[in-house]
Structure formats: structure tokens, C-alpha cells
Amino acid sequence: MGKNNDIIASNQLFAILVNIVIGVGILTLPRTLAEKAGPDSLIVLAIGSVLFLVVALVIQKLVTKFPRKTIIEITNSALFKPVGFLVGLGYFIYTFTLVVLEVRVFGEITKNYLLVNTPIEIIIITFLITSIYLVRSGIESIARLSVIILPLSIFPAILAAAVAIPDLDFTYFLPILRTSWSDMMKALPSVFFSFLGFEFIVFIGFFVGDSKHIKKTTIRTVAFVSCVYFIFTAITIARFGIEESKNLIWPVISLFKSVDIPGTLLENVEVVIIATWLLAIFMTIAIAYFGATFLLSRLIKSKEQNYFAIALLPIIYFLALIPENIVEVTDFMNIFTNYMGTTFSIIIPGFMLLISFLRRKPKRGIKKNG
Amino acid sequence: MDRKKMYLVILLICVSTIVSGCWDKVEIDERAFITAIGYDKYKGPTPEGAEDIEKETEEKPLNRYVRTSIYPNVSLIAEKGEGEPFFVYSTTSISWADGRAEVALRDNKNYYAYHLKAMIFSEEVAKDETLFREMFDTFQRSVFLNNKLHFFVTPGKAQDILMTDTGKNMDVGLYIEELMDKEVSPTRTAKSDLGSIVIDLNESNAALAPRILKSKDELKVSGSAVLKDNKFIGTLGELETRDALILKGEAQNVDYTIKVDGKFIVIGQTDLESKMKAYEDKDEKIRVRFAIKAEGDIIQHYFDTPNEPYDAKYIEAVNKKSSELISRDLRNLFKKVQKDFGADIFKVGEYLRKFEPDTWEKVKDEWEEIYPKIDVEVDFQMNIRRAGIQG
Amino acid sequence: MSNYEELFKPKEENQDKINLTKSLEENLKKVKRILKGSDDMVYREFNVGENQNLKFATAYAEGLADKVIVNEYVLKNLMVLARMTEPQVSNIREKVYELIKNGVLSVSDLKEVDDINVITDNILAGETVLLIDKWDKAIIISSKGWPMRGISEPQSDVVIRGPREGFTETLRVNTALIRRRIKDPKFKIKQMKIGSRSKTDVAVLFIDGLVNQDILKIVVDRLKSIEIDGILVSGYIEQLIEDNWRSPFPQIQSTERPEKVAANIYEGKIAIIIDNTPFALIAPTTFNSLLQASEDYNERFLMASAIRTLRYISMFISVLLPALYIAMLSYHPGMIPTELALYIAGNRDGVPFPAVIEAFIMEGSLELLREAGIRLPGPIGSTIGIVGGLVLGQAAVEAGIVSSLMVIVVAITAIATYSVPNYSFGSPFRLLRFAYMMGAAFLGLYGVVLVFLISLIHLTNLKSFGIPYLAPFVYNMSIKDLKDTFIRAPLHKMKRRPEYVAKNDKDRLSNHFNRDYLKKGEDSGGEK
């Protein structure tokens, strides 16, 4: 990699991570929570966030331990060479699949809410071409754009949701802690997986210039995202009640559908909110896309990352169109997050950290003595 | 050179897609902004003999609804053209989509329901659970239906309501919206917000929906329809609706007429607070208790009775009397809803679920049977704060 | 610490040096040969001294050199005054040059040169050359003086409260205007000549120790690398040294206002002044600084912040409004409040074109009107406004070709476009507007979002001399960075220079300054 265009600040890392994490998950989170945890949704969400913070800190520890290294090099130095390649390949497939799935979900939502008769192919292709432009611009541009897009995509939504406050009925969160522990445990993974995307730090951490701030960034990211999740889950469930929240496929969008901002120039703000949400999902997809091409170029030790971006486009496009319907997509997404997500966000980073501790310990002792 | 050619090809592709594209583009003046839709039950061929041969050949349950939709004459609104203030299309149909298709065959404008304001069911449609559930599912499922729309049940024909000429140069949909959204309106009809009706049906399996009536050339919203188990089960009159809303603490702009010492005294309510409490007493019987505090002004007394109302003791007496009378009315209303309809529109079950989860665990399976038997206690307290400017 | 001197070292001259000889005649001949065919040259040979034995010659370009200086302070002194003082004959041979230089010529700026090419360059720049027989050097007498426009109020950067001075076409006047505002010895004005034929003077202005050395290096390197025959206006330089020539956005700010230049130099930026252009260039430039007007700092902060915010909003309006109009009318009428939607639908009833075409017609004719208005002389220019605004607009609506709402949209867009304080910054928005309209026509709101994303990506890619164009929005997401953006914080809160430019000396206002201190004085004053 050239010297230019590959260093980001930890503040920008925060924006990038938040942008990756907040994507499709937020739209369905209130429904999954209402289904599984009922009135205790918020409590489960809080517990899940704290648990994820622990996982995030583990991943972060690994990243800070090896500054300016990607997961491939980390694995190589912790274990031996081919393993690094395999792990890198795994992460590549993981990010790539994530891109494919999110592109499809994005296409479905856009088609559903904005452009009913436009072929989904056109929607997906225009979106992918735009994201290629960003992917080819490099990580610094991605970082800058993340910083700009983050407020643009989140604040309008929070403002519009705040309009619903007079109609909210927070008694829907009663009774407290009546859900059985086993049910709550079952609901935890869905909270957990709504934070997926954070593990991208294992290769985006490579670009961070001031790696000593990564820990703070990690905590800030998880805190910020869980705040956003908390706000939207609370407002959505308090607006619709448990039963209705279970029924809605995209409860958060329905929330905006039910919002009526009096005396404005706009009615039916959900269209506007979907437009701003498009910015968020764009960032998610573009960053994941970037991650995929970056990992690929690292695996083959090629410097032509920009060409991979174009080469991957038709593959993403065709894969994204494979699932027959939206239900299939969500089913696949659940399986994907359950297995792949666990593997790549908990097992591998945790394992690597463990190994690096075991391997490094004697060295440290020497250093201390000397 | 190659690069330039590539750009040229990309440009050509872009231009051709843009030119051939625009799949969703429909100009605003080519749309029919449906403002209200009404459903009646289809009862055999209409006198005009609008039988659809094509449909008869399909062996399916045919023509279940009469669907009426209206949209305003926009030229008239922009003061550009003349003509009827609105257009009505009525058709028989199997389903929502079928009705839409039938209208699309006749209308020169593109159907567009995003600005739908009112949805009116005749009682016959509302009574039929199948039809009711089919329709409600459509409302909830469709992206292009606004769920801020007003829902009504009418005892007559929805078609008649929609065809009313309000004489105000607007169609019924817009008229109803203004009627329901106006700031000062008496609480004698239920809230019409479809979204909250759906939530109530989901959470408590019972809801109130407003009724709309037509008399001559006038529309009137009056009283409410009780919905339970996803169908219409009965009606409440205007004052009964008012009482129901007082119990729910949602009533505003209410006035009470009370007979004290042979005089009719009218008290205008300025503030209302209702607290419901449901609990299980020692005998394992569920009780519900409403503690309602109301504040009000005397707005009518009796002329030439100097200083009579302007007297603390007198006011106290009126307070007491009115509290008593209103409490009795409210209790009766609760009992009526409870016994006649068995509909938990006051969300007693929801209250138990939220605040008395232990009790709810015990009763939730037989709630349908228990609810009509629960004891009710209403403690309405009227507090007259002002007596106008005459002593 | 500062290595700016090194940066400005001229490149090795390719031009051969032609040395002066000791013979005046030969020297003069050489000069005349180089300047052959230039009939505006004036040569004057004359003798000086008691015996008239010292031969002198002057040469200057008529119209460029100030004749008064040449006549009164050069010729007169040499020919008349020199005779009054009796020179010591013994000294005369050796010291005559010293004498003339130090004792006779009563002009302040003299230079000794020994290269004929330099001499001719100087003559062409308006200086007077004094050649002396039997001496292999020549004296360049500063005599630049040509009729020039006085300092007048700027035409493009108008303010209500603020200085009325604007740059003129003369470089020296312009540098003086800035020097008057920065009386710091560290303020440097480094000059170079660009253009192999035009030999245009270009001055680079900055404060040593404040300026970001990296940026300075980029600027100077780029300036030096320009090899062109002539620089006529500042736009040449701007386009030759900017980072991305494909971008519609100007990456260098140009202004007519000296105080704006001075303010930017104080921020650690670099100004480039080009002779014959009443515009100074400021680099690096950010998106944000192009939306700042110099008056903002003259206003109270509340008002200034409000105006800034308004400006940002108007920027969005000027780009997005027609596109949103198309998207909402043709794709998402559900977004418009019912009553308005019905009104628009009724109003558009009978308009034969789709909203897209309607918008293109109106926006196109607006640009046409504007172009016509600029090119026409003043009094007729206003007629265009009347024809365009009243006659055409009214008639188009009445004829039913466009809807009246479209006219309102176009008008608001136009007003919003002109509220951008920097003229050249307004044009990318005018251009982008059409791209947004295409996006909206093709894919509705989704298309608008796509074009918005593309333009945002372009902006994040853009850099001006190594500084991200969207600074300071793209760094920390902290409120601190936004002090001088869509709000303008009170002056006493802006204690530091913008961090993305100034790397060395960051403090602008002393940390000891605070408002409480002022209040203390007030209290004790009140007690008396």
C-alpha cells in the first residue's frame, strides 16, 4: 500500500464503525425483540449491549495488540502462514456475503417503499456502481464520508421519531422482568447480532493511525449504537405495543409511517426517512464492499484493489438476485449471522487473542527484566 | 483511446436507460387522489343489472363487496376548472385489489391511495369477520396506504355516505378529515385513527370505532361501534360513547347536564383525569375501580336566581349531586359494555397484564369468561372551579 | 526553521547571459537589437561632465515609465546638477559610478545589473536603464508609472459594513493593500515571474512561522512548474495549479477584497497575487471557507450565525429544490400534504409537459436570462430582467405551458444560488442542479439520493493543496470544529486558528482574554 490514502483517525474509525453496524439490523430489531422478549425488550437490549461491549473489547484488544496489521498478518504472526490465509479467506467470504445480503435487503426496501415498478436490477446496479466509486476512492475518503453521513442519516430519523413522543405509551414495557430467563437468553443473540459489523475492525484497524485511542473508540461506538438502538426500540414498541410490533416486518419504518409532523411542508415523512436511511445502508454496504476488496487484495498480495472492486460487482449482483423472496433473504440472514457472525466476531478474535497472550508472555517477561 | 471508448459506451448505456426508464413516473395531474373508500356488502345483482359475465364463469365466491371510491376534482380546488366537486366510482368486487382493478378500467386517471383519508364500512361488512379481517390485513400490509386514515362504521350504506354532496365544494374524504381533525369538537364519537384501532384490537381484542350517519344531505359522526374479535358487535350512542371516553380519560369538551333541585344545571368540563385500577380481592374476584377527577365551570344555571350558584355550599352540593349521578351513569355504561358486548374496551386485561402480572397469569386463559363478571366501582368526582361571570 | 527562502530560489536560467561590455555604443546597439521593432522604446544618449566627456544613455518604454521621474530626477540631475559640483578629477575615473549612484540620482530604487537580457526585461517592465560608457554595468532606475485605475469598491464581493477598498490591476498596489493590514516583519511577499513571454509578476504572500510549510511547498512547486507563454488573468494560474481539474468546484478561492485575503493569511493560508488581475487567489480553500463572507466577522455572532446557517440552507435549496420538485411530483406525491398535492395537481392540469421537462425549460431559460443579463450593458441588462421575470414568466403561466408553482420553484432556486457569497462557488451548484434533476427524473427520490452520494463522494475525494475540501466537517465530529462553519462562534470563543491549516502557531486570541475580565473593570467603574 502506498503511503498516501491509508491513514484514518480514531474519531473517523468511530464514524466508520457506527455506519457499518447501523444498517439493516435496526429496522427489524424492535420486532425480534418484541417477539422474543416482550415487555422486557429494553432490558434485554441493555444486557445485550453490555455483553457485546465485552466482546468488542476482546476484538479491540487484539487489534491494539497488533497495530497496523490486518487479521491475516495477525494470524500469521500468532500461528503459521497458511492459517492466516485461510482465516483471511474466511473473513473475505464473510464480508462478501454480508455485502450480498445487505444489497438484496436494500433493494427490496427501496423497491417496496420508493420505486414499486422499477426493476430491482436497476436499483441494485445503480447502487453498486455508486458504491464502487466510493470503494475506489480509498479508506480516507470512506472515513471522511462516514463522518459526514453519520449525522445526516441518524439525526433526521431521531427528530422524526421524537415527534411520536406524545403518542407513546411506555406501559407496554410492563411488567418488568416477567419474561422467563430462558426466553431472555434466547433473545440475547438477536441483540448481539444487531451489532454485527463491528468485527470489521480486525481489518479496518489496520488503517488507524493513532491506535492507542482504539479502546476509547470501541467503547464510544458500542455506547452510541446501543443508544440509537435503545431510542428506536423504545419509541417503536411504545408506539405500537408488543403485539403490533411483532406483526410489522419493518417496525421502524412503520413508526415513521405513523408519524404526523403537523404543519410541515411534508406529509408521510417515512419516504424522507427512507431516503436518509439509504445513506446509512450505503455506507454499510460500501464499507463492507471495501473490506471485501481490501481483504482480497491482501490475500493475493496484489495492489490492484481498485480492479477487484469492479471484478466483484457482477458477482455481487448475481448472488444478490438469487434468493426467491424476502422471507428467504431474512431466513438466510439469520442463519448467516448465527453461525458466521459468531465465528468471525467471537471465536476467531478470541482465539487469536488467547494465542497471542500465550505466545507473547515469555517475551514480555524478558522485556520487563531488561 | 480505449478509455474514451469505454466512457462513451457507459454514457450511451446511461442515456438509453434514462430515456427508456422512469418506470414509476406518473405525473401528479394524472393521478386520482382517492380520498375515501367505502365498502358495502354485495347482495345480489343491483337494480342497474351490473352483472359481470366474465366473473361469473370463474368458480369462486363472487362479488362480495360493493366498493365505492371517490376522489376530488382537483381543477376545482386549484380554481382552474368547473364541474362536479368530486368523482365517484362504485363497483362490485371480490377483494381490495379486484375493486381497484375494476375502477382502473373505467377511470382515466391513475389510482393513488396514499392520500386516502377515510375508510367507511357498512355495518354488514363490519359484522362479517372474514371480510373485516381481509380488509384490515390489506390496510396493514400495503405500503401505499397511510395508516393515519380515519375508519368509520356506518349503519346505512357506505356508498350513500360517499356520494353525499357536502355543499362545501369538497368531497367526503376531505370533509371527514377536517371534521375529525378540527381542534374543538365534542367528545361524542370515538377516535377514528385506524392505527390505534388496530393496536387496540391486537392488544385487547376490542376497540371503539366511530360511526358515521347520513341524513338527507348531511353527514354526522355520532356514537361509536364496538369492535371485538375482529368484527363489529354493537353500537354505543353518543352519550354512551362520551361516558366510555370519560372512563378512559380521553374526553374533552364535555358538558354534563344535571338536575339539581329541579333545575337543570350544565357543567362544562375543563379538565379530566381518569385512573383505572384493577386488582384481585381476597375472594379471588377481579375488581376494577375507576377514580376520575373532573374540573368544570357552570355554564348554565337558572336566570334570576341571584347569588345562588355563587355560594360555596351550593357548589359543594352540586358537586356531590353531579358526582353521584355521573358515577352511576358511568357504572351503568361499563356494565353494559361488559355484559352486552363482553368487549374489554377499557383495557382491564391489558392493565392486569402490565401491572398485576401474577393475577393476569391466573386469569388470562379464561379472560373472556371472567371479564363479564368482574366488579366495577366508579368514583367520579366533579369539582366546579368557576361559575362564569354572573353570580 | 523556515526554509521558504530555499523554495523560492529561481530555477537555473536557461537563457544565455549576455554580458555588458565597456563600450556604451556596443551595449546600446545590443539592447536596440533585442528590442528591434518596438517603436515605443525611447533611447536618449547624452554627455555629462565639464568636458562633456562622459557618455551616458538612458532607455525606457514610453507609457510604462514615468516620464517625470526620468526627466526630473535622472536626466536633469545628471545633466544639470552634476555640473554644479566640481568633481575631483582624480577620483572621477574610479568613482564616477559610485558618485552617480549615490550622489546624483535622486530616485529611491536603483539596481546594478550586468546582463543585457535583464536590462531588456526591465525596460519592458517599465524601468529606466542608465548605461554609462566605459563601465560594464548598467543602472536600473525604478520608474514604473503608467496610468492606472484607482482603488475602487469591489464589484463582486460586496459588503455593507466593511472596507470599500478593492484590488486593482497593479500588483504593487495590491500587495501594499495587504501589507497595510499585516505589519508583521514575518509577513513575506515573495515574487516570481511566470510566463515565458508575458513575464507576469506573481507574488506569493504568507506569514512565515504561521503558514503550513507543506502547503507552501506544494503551492510554490506548482507555481514554478508552470511553463506557459502568457498569464493574462488569475484564472490561468488557478486552473493550472488546482488539484482536480475535472471537478466543478473551485479549489482556490479568488477575491477582490484585501481584508479577506489578510484574514486568510492570518489563518495560515497562502495568497497569490497576479499582476494585471484585480483578484487575489487564496489557497488552500475549503468548501466551508467559500461560504464565508468577510462581513460575517463584522456582524454580531448571533446574526452572523443565523446568516451562515441560512447560507448553508440556501446552498441545499439551490441544488436540491428543482430535483425534489420533480421527484415529489412525478414519483412521490404522497410526501406532499394532501391539500397542497391536490392544489398542485389541479394547477398542473392542462400543462402539456411532464414535471421534468417543465423544470428543464424553466431552469434553462433562467440560465439564459442570466447570461444575457451579464453580457448586456447596464441599462439594457435590467430590461432583460423585466422581460424574463414579468413578461415571460407571467405569459408562460397564463399560456399554461408551465405551472405557476414551477415559476416559484425556479425563482427561489435562483435567489438561493445568488446568496452564495463567492461568485465562482455559485457556478458548480448551478451545474449540479441539472445532474440532480436528471437523477430525480430517472429514479425519483432514490435518484436524488444517488446523485447526492456521488457528489458527496466527489467532495470527500477532493483536496485543495493537501487539505480535504470538506474540512473541518470530516475530522472529529466535535462541536469545536464547527465554530466557524454554519455558525460563527463569538470572536472570543474562537481562540485558535483552524487546525487543519495552521500547524505551527495555533493561538489566535490569547488564552488570557476572557469576558469576565472585562466585566471586572465594569464593576469597579460602577462603584465610583
Image (tube, rainbow, N blue to C red):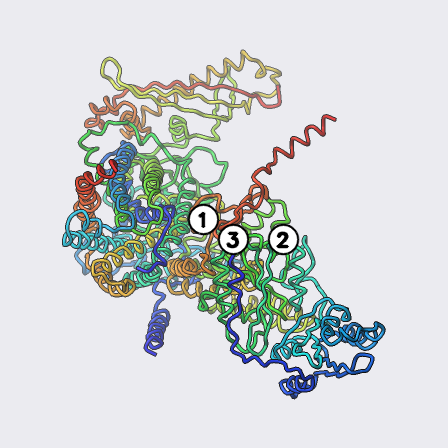
The C terminus of chain C sits in image quarter: top right
Q: In the image shown, does B63 or C53 lie closer to the viewer?
A: C53
Q: Is residue A78 visible?
A: yes
- Do the residues indicated by labels 2 and 3 lie within the same chain of the protein? yes
Residue C184: which numbered mark, if any? 2
Q: In the image shown, does B387 or B217 lie closer to the viewer?
A: B387
Chain identifier of the residue bearing label 2 in the image? C
Residue kind at label 3, given as amino acid type: Ile
Q: Is residue B127 above or below residue C167?
A: above
- In what element is the residue under mark 3? helix
Residue kind at label 1, given as amino acid type: Leu
Say which residue appears at 66% left-offset and 69% top-offset.
C169
Q: In the image shown, does B356 or A10 lie closer to the viewer?
A: A10
- In what element is the residue under mark 2? loop
Q: Is residue C159 above or below residue B177?
A: below
Residue B174: which numbered mark, if any? 1
Disc 3 target residue: C313
Task: Tell me the CA gap for discs 2 and 1.
Answer: 71 Å
Chain identifier of the residue bearing label 1 in the image? B
Q: In the image shown, does B174 or C370 lie closer to the viewer?
A: C370
Which residue, as the protein is rendered here, is positioned at the far top? B313
Q: Is residue C331 visible?
A: no
Chain identifier of the residue bearing label 3 in the image? C
Q: Residues within 10 Å of mark 3 (few under 14, many from 20)?
A: few
- In what element is the residue under mark 1? helix
Q: Residues within 10 Å of mark 2 (few under 14, many from 20)?
A: few
Q: Are marks 2 and 3 in contact (CB under 8 Å)?
A: no
State which quadrant residue B378 falls in.
top left
Which residue, as the protein is rendered here, is positioned at the far front? C90
Q: Nearer the viewer, mark 2 or mark 1?
A: 2
